[in-house]
Image: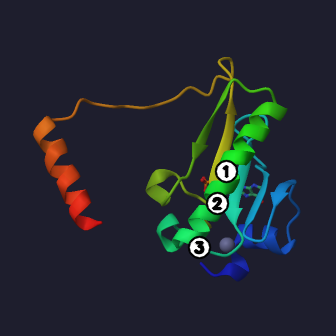
């Protein structure tokens, strides 16, 4: 997708209104229009990139610096009991807007959102081999 037609690029350019909560040279954060919970915030790089892997280390570092600080702040403002930080990467992972973004989702025991984490126990040999393959690919 081109930056011209990207909804988050339009927000960056001010062509679509948003409730901004933070902005610096590289990063913009605004309130989600369809929040999962009160304070649900979207954090984006101020350049068009569809997937996390499309961003270099400097851009990822810029995002990381903001997410840590902003999470703490948002959680404190809405008096949340915890929060999720999510980055849906690719349609299969739930990404709808094709511009890299992190979600900061404040959480309360009573929020009814639940949490699906369908883990299964791993085979020790498989883990050893997989870790080797990933290290070898670095
Ligand atoms: P995704 O599913 O791609 O990870 O999440 C995209 C998020 O962007 C959704 O939570 C959605 O509500 C939010 N969103 C989509 N369009 C707009 C918009 O025009 N303004 C704002 N503030 N949020 C948006
Ligand atoms: Zn974009």
Q: Please say if the residues under marks 2 and 1 sit with CB atoms less than 8 Å apart.
A: yes
Res 49 label: 3
**Residue 79 appears in view:** yes
Q: Quadrant of residue 79?
A: top right
- Mark 1 neighbour class, 10 Å CA radius: few under 14, some 14 to 19, many 20 or more: many
107 relative to 136, above or below: above
Q: Position of residue 34 (x, y in %)?
A: 75, 45
Residue depicted at x 74% and y 73%: 9
Decide if ligand 2 comes within 8 Å of the CB at mark 3. yes
- Residue 104 occupies quadrant: top right
Ligand 2: which quarter? bottom right
The residue sitting at 72% across, 70% down in the picture is 26
Which dot marks residue 63?
A: 2
Residue 14 at x, y = what percent? 87, 71
Q: Which image quadrant is residue 85 in?
A: top right
Q: Residues within 10 Å of mark 3 (few under 14, many from 20)?
A: some
Tell which circle, 3 or 2, labels the residue nearer the N-terminal end. Answer: 3
Quadrant of the image containing the N terminus: bottom right
Camera-side residue of 136 and 95: 136
Q: Which mark is residue 67?
A: 1
Q: Nearer the viewer, mark 3 or mark 2?
A: 2
């Amino acid at each position: 997708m081109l930056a011209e037609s990207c909804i988050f690029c339009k927000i960056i350019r001010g062509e679509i209104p948003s409730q901004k909560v933070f902005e610096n040279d590289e990063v913009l954060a605004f309130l989600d229009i369809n929040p999962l919970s009160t304070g649900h915030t979207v954090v984006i790089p101020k350049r068009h990139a569809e997937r996390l892997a499309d961003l270099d280390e400097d851009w990822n570092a810029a995002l990381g610096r903001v997410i840590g600080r902003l999470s703490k702040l948002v959680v404190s403002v809405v008096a949340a009991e915890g929060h999720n930080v999510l980055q849906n990467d690719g349609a299969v992972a739930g990404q709808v807007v094709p511009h890299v973004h992190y979600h900061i989702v404040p959480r309360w025991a009573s929020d009814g959102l639940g949490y699906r984490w369908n883990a299964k126990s791993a085979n020790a040999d498989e883990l050893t081999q997989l870790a080797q393959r990933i290290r070898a690919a670095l």
